[in-house]
Image (tube, grey):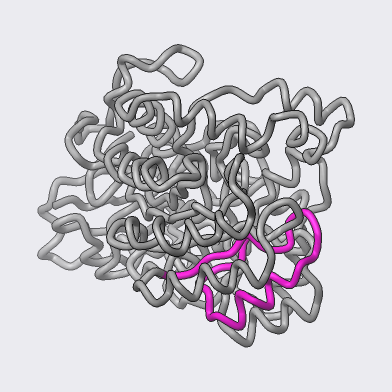
């Protein structure tokens, strides 16, 4: 049990209305058994909570933990040379045709042991946790065969309990050792890491050596039954060079029949009609949406599909950003996420994504912060995340700043002073 007090500005998201941060000045939060027990003005703390161990944050701002609703963070290999090629003007399709892109990562990932992949994934999760991400969606998609796709999902789940056990990680992958704490000390490796939501993305691209129709059969007939007990969601990459709307409909319909929620990579490289498919199938989320239209926005809003936007991917690829302003104004629920992956968005920081959503996509600071917290939770259909309210999981970010406005106002500065995960101080 803990009482966090002397909070200068608290973001609660308590109303649930998009963009309404529910700010409380000079606030306090009581935590019990990993959940929020009480929240309100410091002057109104109930007597029963005043004797708890107190953490004084000295006027700093506190937010819900960031919910990163779209990542591909279980992978091996280095594609920095592809970044250099894109900067020189080569297209993603050119790089893919030369043997790069997703297939290069698939080859490297298949060749690496489960233990090594787990260590690398845990190191990435630790860095995410240190920058305030407390819940993360993790996709498979770099296996492209039944054994490896199932393996990657299990690695994602296992890595979440290994956060901090990174002593064997090469320097290029992350720092060694643990981290310090506040007055309430806690060390990593105790089974409390980032919460992981596993998503099956066997339909990422077609594996080499298999014809298109045969690969779709493989996904539906062999992969889906094997991962149905592990994956919370099924995703399909619908775009040129990947899968068609009809193929995605078949895969996602089968996944829904096995109890999985639905997600779609939609309208990223070109307009395909995938956003309309997301609305038709009642998907939880349509992601990317760089080429979404006003008609797509109307369909998504009517169906209650969350638009999970990925400004770091468009920024890295130097491509047009998704029309975040248009989608928000059309009444679509918006989330923002890192799209952490080795090729087109090697980004682990949700604060950076907030910056890009404001400066590149046209969202206001309030909208971007809401989209990075409660918007992400809604994308993953998690009712107990992304807000600071009684009964919610006690996932919190403390900024070394008086207001959330400093996140987009001071890009490139590490403003995360503290992180609480499920009621435990982890930074």
Residue 409 or 164: which is nearer the viewer? 164
Q: Is residue 244 visible?
A: yes
Q: Residue at x 40, y 40 (%)?
A: 148
Please tell me in which quadrant of the rendered image residue 305 appears: bottom right
Q: Quadrant of the C terminus?
A: top left
Q: In the displayed structure, does residue 218 sit left or right of residue 204?
A: left
Residue 157: percent from left, percent from top: 30, 45
Determine if the magenta segment contains residue 403.
no
Toward the right, the furthest residue is: 89
Compared with 376, 119 (above or below) is above
Residue 336: percent from left, percent from top: 59, 56
Compared with 51, 39 (above or below) is below
Compared with 129, 226 (above or below) is below
Q: Is residue 366 visible?
A: no
Compared with 253, 11 (above or below) is above
Q: In the displayed structure, does residue 53 sit left or right of residue 197?
A: left
Q: Residue at x 31, y 37 (%)?
A: 159
Residue 174 or 227: which is nearer the viewer? 227
Residue 271: percent from left, percent from top: 80, 65
Determine if the magenta segment contains residue 281.
yes
Residue 2: percent from left, percent from top: 18, 50
Q: Residue at x 30, y 56 (%)?
A: 230
Magenta-highlighted residues: 261-287
Q: Residue at x 71, y 21 (%)?
A: 81
Q: In the displayed structure, does residue 139 sit left or right of residue 20?
A: left
């Amino acid at each position: 049990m803990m009482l966090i007090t002397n909070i200068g500005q608290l973001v609660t998201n308590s109303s649930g209305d998009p963009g309404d941060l529910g700010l409380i000045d000079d606030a306090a939060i009581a935590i019990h058994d990993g959940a929020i027990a009480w929240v309100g003005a410091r002057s109104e703390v109930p007597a029963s909570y005043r004797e708890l161990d107190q953490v004084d944050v000295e006027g700093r701002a506190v937010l819900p933990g960031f919910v990163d609703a779209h990542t591909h963070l279980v992978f091996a290999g280095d594609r920095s040379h592809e970044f250099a090629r894109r900067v020189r003007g080569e297209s993603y399709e050119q790089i893919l045709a030369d043997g790069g892109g997703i297939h290069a990562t698939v080859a490297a990932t298949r060749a690496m042991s489960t233990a090594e992949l787990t260590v690398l994934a845990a190191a990435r999760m630790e860095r995410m946790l240190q920058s305030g991400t407390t819940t993360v969606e993790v996709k498979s998609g770099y296996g492209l065969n039944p054994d490896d796709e199932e393996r990657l999902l299990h690695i994602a789940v296992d890595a979440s309990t290994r956060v901090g056990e990174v002593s064997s990680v090469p320097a290029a992958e992350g720092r060694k050792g643990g981290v310090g704490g506040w007055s309430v000390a806690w060390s990593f490796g105790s089974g409390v890491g980032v919460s992981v939501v596993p998503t099956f993305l066997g339909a990422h691209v077609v594996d080499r050596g298999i014809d298109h129709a045969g690969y779709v059969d493989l996904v539906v007939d062999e992969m889906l039954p094997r991962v149905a007990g592990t994956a919370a969601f099924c995703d399909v990459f619908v775009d040129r060079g990947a899968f068609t709307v009809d193929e995605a409909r078949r895969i996602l319909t089968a996944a829904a029949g096995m109890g999985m929620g639905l997600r779609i990579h939609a309208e990223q490289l070109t307009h395909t009609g995938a956003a309309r498919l997301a609305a038709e199938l009642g998907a939880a989320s349509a992601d990317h949406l760089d080429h979404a239209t006003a008609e797509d926005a109307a369909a998504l809003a009517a169906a209650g599909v969350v638009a999970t936007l990925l400004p770091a991917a468009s920024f890295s690829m130097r491509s047009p950003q998704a029309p975040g302003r248009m989608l928000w104004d059309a009444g679509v629920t918006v989330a923002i996420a890192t799209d952490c992956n080795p090729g087109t968005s090697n980004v682990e920081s949700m604060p950076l994504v907030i910056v890009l959503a404001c400066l590149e996509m046209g969202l206001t600071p309030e909208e971007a912060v809401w989209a990075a917290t409660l918007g992400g939770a809604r994308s993953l259909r998690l009712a107990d995340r992304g807000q600071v309210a009684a009964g919610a999981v006690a996932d919190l970010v403390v900024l070394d700043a008086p207001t959330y406005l400093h996140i987009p106002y001071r890009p490139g500065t590490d403003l995360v002073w503290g992180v609480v995960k499920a009621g435990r101080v982890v930074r």
